Image: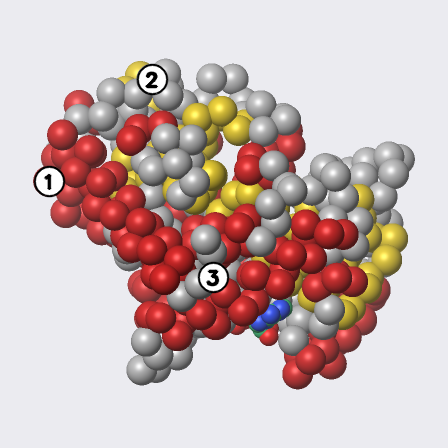
Amino acid sequence: YRRPVTVTVTGAAGQISYALLFRIASGDLLGPDTPVRLNLLEVPAALAATDGVAMELEDCAFPLLRSVEITDDPMVAFDGCSVGLLVGARPRGKGMERSDLLEANGAIFGPQGAAINTVAADDVRLLVVGNPANTNALITRANAPDVPADRFTSMMRLDHNRAVARLAGHLGVGSGEVRRMAVWGNHSSTQYPDLTHAEVDGAGVVDRLDPTWVRKDFIPTVAGRGSAIIDARGASSAASAANAAVDQVREWYDGTEGDDWTSAGIVSDGAYGIPEGLVCSVPVRATGVGYDVVRDLDVDPFSRERIEATVAELVAERDAVRAAGLIR
Ligand code: NAI
């Protein structure tokens, strides 16, 4: 066995965590040789429920699970943290203004960023799941200035997986055969699932697809999948979101297979004209150490327009949190 790794999960009593924690503890996240210490962060009102989850974790007798710590203090939760999964967030309530939503999330991710800056391990990597995920990642980073920019990601893997599954279903192939999918921009309805470079069996597929299907079915179905699941289930995606978090973090450590790529929200370095510093989804290759943006893609005029629209939404979110004094 390697030495135990501290994994911090926020929103530990929530729906996603109820699927996620068991995957982490069973070894799905960091592999079968890495023991895990779980640090669970919740609000005071949910600590009792978190205790219940911890009892269930104990009852699984996972060989890799070394300890479970429950706290409402970010300074305790992020102490020694190497992997931070920031799931807990303030959902948008009925009649809630956007500015209220951003401020409520600033009050969550600001202090968590500050704690990460002070007490997390030097090798910390962070995945922000709680919505608005990209902008919450931006706030977290602004409050953790000593942590390198490439340690912050927002979760776009669920959107990516949805796009892969939708294309595979349409073509009647296994989802494992789809490569080079890309989802650009915000984890919101403006996201751009882009299959212009997607391949099955090493060959491009876009020429085989009806452009009307791509624009009127594929793109809106992938981008609207979150709402469709809420309508059908009466609750937002949880198991698939947990699965995507596991996929994204595992690939971040293990590296992307061959010359394939994936989609992740990362701190922009200006590639593809995306403003520097914005946390925005782009096609990336995981190297094991970090992410390399796939830089050399042709962007056709339709794609350009869609990318600009979703980036404009991220810029508006950034400007709003800046105006609220949550970032500089
Ligand atoms: P949930 O409401 O079941 O759980 C959220 C938990 O976070 C609650 O237990 C709450 O007490 C906790 N929490 C709130 N403030 C906290 C704080 N300051 N510190 C620690 N915990 C705190 O929600 P669910 O279904 O688990 O979803 C969590 C988040 O993930 C939501 O924001 C949701 O919109 C987002 N999401 C993101 C996806 C993505 O693809 N990026 C996909 C699906 C959901």
Instruction: For ligand 1, tell me if the residue under mark 2 lies within 8 Å.
Output: no
Crowding near pointer 3: few (<14 within 10 Å), some, many (20+)? many
- x then y, percent, for residue 308: 22, 40
Towards the viewer: 62 or 2: 2
Dot 1 or dot 3, earlier in sequence: 1
Residue at 87% of width from left, 38% of height from top? Answer: 3
Instruction: For ligand 1, tell me if the residue under mark 3 lies within 8 Å.
Output: no
Q: CA distance from mark 1 to mark 3?
A: 42 Å
Residue at 56% of width from left, 35% of height from top? Answer: 150
Towards the viewer: 3 or 22: 3
- x then y, percent, for residue 309: 21, 46
Horizontal arrangement in the rendering, residue 95 relative to residue 56 (left or right): left
**Rendered-image quadrant of the N terminus:** top right
Towards the viewer: 267 or 22: 267
Badge number at residue 212: 1
- The answer to whether residue 190 is seen in the rendering is yes
Q: Which residue is mark 2?
A: 296
Q: Secondary structure at mark 1?
A: helix
- x then y, percent, for residue 77: 74, 61
| Residue 99 sits above or below residue 24 on the image | below
Mark 2 is on which residue type? Asp
Crowding near pointer 1: few (<14 within 10 Å), some, many (20+)? few
Q: Which residue is mark 3?
A: 326
- The answer to whether residue 24 is seen in the rendering is no
Horizontal arrangement in the rendering, residue 302 relative to residue 80 (left or right): left
Horizontal arrangement in the rendering, residue 147 relative to residue 267 (left or right): right
Mark 1 is on which residue type? Thr
Of discs 1 and 2, which sits in the foreground? 2
Residue at 19% of width from left, 33% of height from top? Answer: 304
Dot 1 or dot 2, earlier in sequence: 1
Among all residues in the image, which is located at the extreme left? 212
Q: Secondary structure at mark 3?
A: loop
